[in-house]
Image (spheres, rainbow, N blue to C red):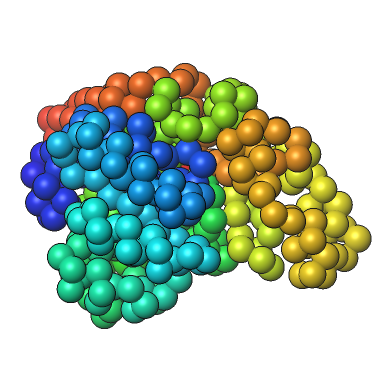
Amino acid sequence: MANRITELFKIKYPLIQAGMIWCSGWKLASAVSNAGGLGIIGSGSMYPDILDEHINKCKKATNHPFAVNLPMIYPDIDKHIETILRHKVPIVFTSAGNPKTWTSLLKDNGVTVVHVVSSLKFALKSEAAGVDAVVAEGFEAGGHNGREETTTMTLIPIIANQLKIPLIAAGGIGTGKGMFAAMVLGADGVQIGSRFVASNESSAHQKFKQKVLEAKDGDTALTLKELTPVRLIKTGFYNKVQEAYQKGANVEELRDLLGRGRAKKGMFEGDLEEGELEIGQIAGLINQIKPAANIVKEIIGEFNEIKDQICSSNKFSF
Ligand SMILES: Cc1cc2nc3c(=O)[nH]c(=O)nc-3n(C[C@H](O)[C@H](O)[C@H](O)COP(=O)(O)O)c2cc1C
C-alpha cells in the first residue's frame, strides 16, 4: 500500500494512531508501529521526565518509526523539544498552535514535521511554514477541535484541492470503509484517535473504555468553545457546563468550572461524573476493546475488501 505517506514515514500502511493525552503512551504507540501503522506518543499529559521514559520504552518495544505529538499549549514545551531532539525521534506531530514556531528548529535537526489543523487557512499556513504533511481534523473528532464545526467530509476535499504536500484525514474514521472514503475524498492517509482509546494498550481507565463502548450516536458534543473547544461524552461534567451556559456564565466562570485536571480525572482515573471524557462521534460504532494490532489489521483488511468490491462492481456505472 505504498503512497506519499508510507514513503514519508517509512511505514507499511498510511494509518496513523493519533497522539492522545492520557491514552497514548509507549505501549499503544509501539503496538501500532509494530503492526505497520505509525504510533504516536501523546506528550501533552506527560511531565518531561515521563516523556523521556515513554520514548525510551517505545524505542525498546519497536524497531519501526514512531512519532511524538506536541501540543504547543504545553507549558514546558522547551523541555519536550530538548527530549525529542536528544532521543532523535524521527517524526513530530505539532498541534494547537502556530506551525511557524517550532517547524524550522525541528526540521534543521532532521525531524519530519506534521501539523494538525481544522481549516484550509491553517493548512496553507502550515505548508508555507515548511511542514512535511498536514493532518486535517473534522468536527467529528474526539478531543480538542476547531471552532468552525467543519466536518471531515467537507474539510478533506476543500484542503486536498489546494495543498501540495501530503494530507492526512482525521475525525470520524474508525473502519476500513471510513479510511477508504477519506482517501477517495483526497487524503493520503488517516489519523485515528477514538478507535484506539478502546484498545488493550491504551492507557485510558477501564471505566472510560467501557463508557466508549456504551456510547451511541448523539452521546458526544463539542463544548466549551469560549475556552478550547472539546468533544466529550455527555456525562456529569458536560451537564454542569450546560447548566452554566443556561445561567449565562461568562468565560471566567466557565474557566473556574473547568478548573484543572478534569481530563486526567475522567480519562485516566475513571471518574465518569466529574471528569472530562474526550471521545469522537465514531464512538457510536465502537463496541469492543481489542489489541491495537487487531484494530490495524481489521481496518486494513476492510479497506482492501471495499476497494476490491468497488473496483470490480458495476454499482457505480450509470
Ligand atoms: C482521548 C483523546 C485525546 C486526544 N488528545 C490529543 C492531543 O493530546 N493532541 C492532539 O493533537 N490531539 C488530540 N486528540 C485528537 C486526536 O489526535 C485525533 O485527531 C482525533 O482523535 C481524530 O478523530 P477521531 O477521534 O474521530 O478518530 C485527542 C483525541 C482523543 C479522543
Question: What residue is drawn where x is 35% and y is 32%?
Answer: 27
Question: What residue is drawn where x is 43% and y is 54%?
Answer: 48
Instruction: Tell me how many marks there are.
Output: 0
Q: Nearer the viewer, residue 229 or 208?
A: 208
Q: In this image, 102 relative to 262: left or right?
A: left
Q: Is the residue 234 above or below the residue 211 in the image?
A: below
Question: What residue is drawn where x is 29% and y is 58%?
Answer: 84
Q: x, y (%) of residue 16?
A: 29, 44
Q: Nearer the viewer, residue 269 or 223?
A: 269
Q: x, y (%) of residue 57?
A: 30, 36
Q: In this image, 125 relative to 165: left or right?
A: right
Q: Quadrant of the N terminus?
A: top left
Q: x, y (%) of residue 51?
A: 39, 49
Q: Is residue 173 visible?
A: no
Q: x, y (%) of residue 268?
A: 58, 36
Q: Is residue 273 visible?
A: yes
